[in-house]
Image (cartoon, rainbow, N blue to C red):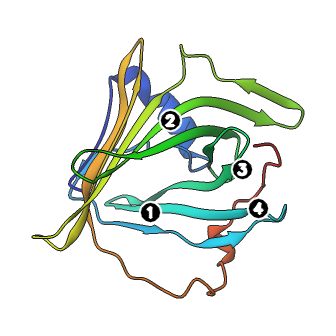
């Protein structure tokens, strides 16, 4: 990633807390090597699922930002379960912009643990916008992720480029790419 950033200093404790479960990135930097592993599989509830395990190779050690996504046909959106324990679920809405880039916008967020299923209030929630495109001249994908809070401004984000290796979808999901806990609620 060309740049990984976070907002004002009061954001750092929240990023550090989320970093313990691979929900957020508590570090910032420039020119950070990055890999993302997207693997389709059926989760333990029989749902078609795709991993989005991002590993950022920071100088003081790697940090991960994990997500697993399923489609919810009732709401017509993707549910993005963040982190190793899927405590945070975000609705995602996808469209193509006028330049042909994929744009993903977050909707409501829910915190889930045991019987708790609470909507995350806008005061502490983040609005994510992801823009991903392919650059024919450079021969790579470009990505920009920006998470903001409507009251406190920018929270964190990253931007950069990557290339892709395509492997057969029949390849088994490695255990380290699967979440520790799978949430049943969409």
Whole-angstrom CA distance, mark 2 to mark 1, is 21 Å
Q: Is residue 27 above or below residue 167?
A: above
- Left or right of residue 92: residue 185: right
Of callouts 3 and 1, the N-terminal one: 1
Q: State the residue position of label 4.
A: 47
Of callouts 2 and 1, the N-terminal one: 1
User: Mark on residue 15?
Assistant: none
Secondary element under disc 4, as helix, strand or loop, is loop
Q: Is residue 13 above or below residue 30?
A: above
Q: Is residue 121 above or below residue 31?
A: above
Q: State the residue position of label 3.
A: 85
- Left or right of residue 14: residue 173: right
Whole-angstrom CA distance, mark 2 to mark 4, is 21 Å
Secondary element under disc 2, as helix, strand or loop, is strand
Q: State the residue position of label 2.
A: 106
The outermost residue toward the right is 115
Of callouts 2 and 3, the N-terminal one: 3
Viewer-proximal residue, 147 or 31? Answer: 147
Residue 173: x and y in percent read 66, 78
**Quarter holding the N terminus?**
bottom left
Q: State the residue position of label 1.
A: 55
Secondary element under disc 3, as helix, strand or loop, is loop
Whole-angstrom CA distance, mark 1 to mark 4, is 25 Å
């Amino acid at each position: 990633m060309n740049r990984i950033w976070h907002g004002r200093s009061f954001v750092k404790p929240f990023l550090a807390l989320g970093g313990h479960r691979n929900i957020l990135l508590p570090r910032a930097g420039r020119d950070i090597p990055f890999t993302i592993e997207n693997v389709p599989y059926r989760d333990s509830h029989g749902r078609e699922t795709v991993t989005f395990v991002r590993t950022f190779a920071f100088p003081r050690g790697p940090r991960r930002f994990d997500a697993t996504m399923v489609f919810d046909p009732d709401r017509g959106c993707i549910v993005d379960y963040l982190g190793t324990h899927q405590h945070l679920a975000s609705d995602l809405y996808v469209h193509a912009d006028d330049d042909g880039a994929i744009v993903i916008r977050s909707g409501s967020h829910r915190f889930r643990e045991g019987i708790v299923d609470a909507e995350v209030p806008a005061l502490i929630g983040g609005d994510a916008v992801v823009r991903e495109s392919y650059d024919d001249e450079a021969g790579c994908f470009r990505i920009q992720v920006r998470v903001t809070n409507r009251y406190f401004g920018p929270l964190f984000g990253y931007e950069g480029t990557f290339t892709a290796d395509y492997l057969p979808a029949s390849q088994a999901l490695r255990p380290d790419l699967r979440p520790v806990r799978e949430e049943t609620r969409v």
